[in-house]
Amino acid sequence: MNKWEEFFNKNDGNNFPHTSLITFFFRHIYKIKKKRINILDLGCGTGSSLMLFKKKSFSVDLVDISRAALNKIKNKNKNIETFNKDIISYLKYSKKKYDLIIDSTAIQHQHEDEIKQSYSLINKNLKKNGYFFSINLNSSRNINDNNFKVTSLKKNKLLNLFKLCNLKKVDYNFFYYTENNSKHYIKFNVIYGQKL
């Protein structure tokens, strides 16, 4: 059993998307006037992003390596399709084009050569004017364990890797999260870009 299957057999994952995704979504995606808006959530876990996609015009594909996580998603939304695949395989063989591809801390769990491969496949899966939104976490100390992972990649390295997506209008921002006034933190690195 892989670590994600084990994790989602014991845990429910997140119940809501990160605030940076909510803000991005309402600034850039919600206002799109199309009959059908295709959205791909890579490493979707138990579908925390689904609360954003209630409009009938949203068609959402959810990809996760954990069947247990995908099983918890059923019946959350009628406009979804789930795929039990790893990120690279899905991106490599998908024929569908998306208006938005989301990575909420999934790609960061890959080895650097896999991150490069994933990022280099993003562009081919986006429609013209489509967006790629990515969150990567890092920390002031090593807090990795079997249930929580952060990346060691810092801003400049992340931005250099993100260039492999070959997107324009790239924006970077970050948010710090601390608990109980601790001097230790988790940094949410948020990067998005658009295919023009």
Image (cartoon, rainbow, N blue to C red):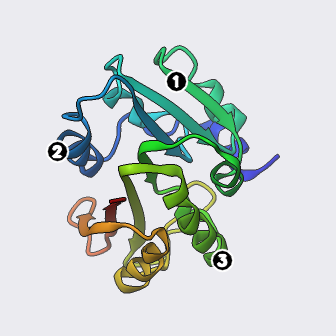
Q: Quadrant of residue 185 in the image?
A: bottom left
What residue sits 26% from the left and 63% below the top? Answer: 178
Of labels 1 and 3, earlier in sequence is 1
Left or right side of 5 for 169: left
Task: Tell me residue 72's x, y (percent).
Answer: 59, 25
Q: Which mark is residue 113?
A: 3
Residue 192 in sight in this render: yes
Residue that label 1 marks: 80
Residue 188 in sight in this render: no
Task: Tell me residue 152's x, y (percent).
Answer: 49, 79
10 Å crowding of disc 3: few (<14), some (14-19), many (20+): few
Q: Answer above or below: position of 158 versus 192.
A: below
Tell me the amino acid under the disc marked 2. Arg
19 or 194, which lies in front?
A: 194
Tell me the amino acid under the disc marked 1. Ile
Residue that label 2 marks: 27
In space, the residues marked 2 and 1 are separated at their CA atoms by: 22 Å
Left or right side of 27 for 94: right
